[in-house]
Structures are given as structure tokens and as C-alpha cells.
Image (cartoon, rainbow, N blue to C red):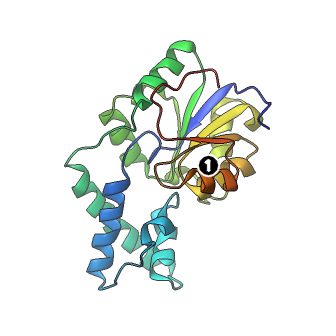
Amino acid sequence: MTGTVAGAVVFDMDGVLLDSGAHHRDAWRRLLADLGVEPAPDFWRRTIGRPAEEAVAQLLDRPVEAAEAAALARRKREHYAELTTRGMLPVAGAPRFVTALAEAGVPRAVATSALRPDVESLLTAIGVRRHFEVIVTADDVRWGKPNPEVYLRAAEGLGLPPRVCLVFEDSVVGVHAARRAGMRVIGLTTAHTTRELLAAGAERAIPDFEGFEWPV
């Protein structure tokens, strides 16, 4: 797969374009405090890359009915929205890299487990929204990562076969999703180690986009 020439780039959002990990961790911690639940040492890692509705059961370590999961996910997002009013920063070098791709005419998409209103506002806040015509969110799919649906829909939106798409992902479940879609993956070590990302199927891992150049 690494020998395939990339003809398009698909980005996850949180932890790839946005340095949003701290806000997400704090939002989950607040939700658990609301419920009187002591966070497990690795609680944050259980949520990475998953839609909030699916992450709830992982955090509570028990089956959760759909209605309860939706209500708790909504509360977590309310905490997150409050935290983001403090400001949001891009992953280092990400806006420059996205702009360079746009100027080079490289097809681009975002494929994320976040909800569309959050995606629209956050990508606008870091100045890259205008560079993406194709954005696939949790609102657009039935199955979250590691199911490949979000990435397959991104390729479909670009009008390109999955095998020519290069994905940037920070989560193990996201890497699994992209690989199952038949795409190449480069990992961002904002949430997992290089070893974990390579073991999941990424071909390499980088800390951020500083000094990163196209073509790959």
C-alpha cells in the first residue's frame, strides 16, 4: 500500500487539525464527575476517535441504552462547548499544510466523529474551513470508527477510489477505519505513541505538520 501514489488527502479533525485533546479530556472528566464516577487511569484513551454516543459505554464500562447514551453524549458536548470558549489552537503547521494542498490543487476532505455544527465552527476558527468542500461528520454516517464508513463516504464525495486517498489520523480506531477503507494512513502522535499507531496500520507517524511537505 505504501507504494501507491496519493492523489487526495483526508483529515480527521480532533488531534489532527485541531489541538483539542485537553478540552475533550476535561469535558469527559466533568461528565464523569456529574455522574459521581471516578475516572479510570486510561479513561481518555477509551474515547479517542469514537463518537461520543459510543464512547459513553466505554467510559462507564457497562452496556448503555441508546437514549441514555445520547443524553450523556449531549451533556459531554455541552461541557466541551463551554470549554472551547477559552479558545482553540490548530495542530502546529496544519493550516499551512492545508493551504499548500489547496494551492497545489490536491483534493481534500475531512472525515470526523464530531458533529457538523462543531466541525463548521471549529474549522472556521482555525482558518481552514474554506479549503474543504467535502466534510463527512458523525451526522452523515450510521457507524462510527473503526467502521470504515466515514472514510468511504469521504472518498465518494471526492469522486476518487479509496486506494488513492492518504489519511491523517491520531487515533487507533481511526487508523483501523482508514485501513479497512483501503487507504494509506499517516499517524499524528497527539493521542497515541508512534508504536501504537504503526501497530494499528499507519505507515509512519509524525508529531505535527511543521516542515511536512507534499507530495508524500
> In percent of the image, x 39 and y 42: which residue is there?
18
Give amino acid for label 1. Answer: Val
Tell me the residue at 76%/44% (across/down).
Answer: 182
Judge left or right: residue 168 versus residue 163. Answer: left
Give the quadrant of the C terminus. top right
Relative height, residue 83 to residue 183 (above, below): below
Q: Position of residue 187 (x, y in %)?
A: 58, 44
Neighbours of disc 1 within 10 Å: few (<14), some (14-19), many (20+): many
- Labels in figure, total: 1
Indicate the secondary structure of the residue bearing disc 1.
helix
Q: Is residue 12 above or below residue 27?
A: above
Q: Residue at x 80, y 38 (%)?
A: 1
Q: Nearer the viewer, residue 14 or 113?
A: 14
User: Can residue 21 be seen in the rendering of this structure?
Assistant: yes
Where does residue 123 sit, x and y in percent of width and height?
38, 37
- The answer to whether residue 148 of the structure is visible from this angle is no
Relative horizontal placement of residue 72, taking residue 143 as reference (left or right): left
Q: Residue furthest front?
A: 195
Q: Position of residue 214 (x, y in %)?
A: 59, 21
Residue at the spot x=39%, y=68% of the render? 73
* Nearer-the-camera pick, 109 or 193: 193
Identify the residue position indicated by label 1 in the image. Answer: 150
Q: Quadrant of residue 169?
A: top right
Image x and y of residue 16, in percent: 47, 42
Locate residue 55 relative to residue 158 in the image: left or right: left
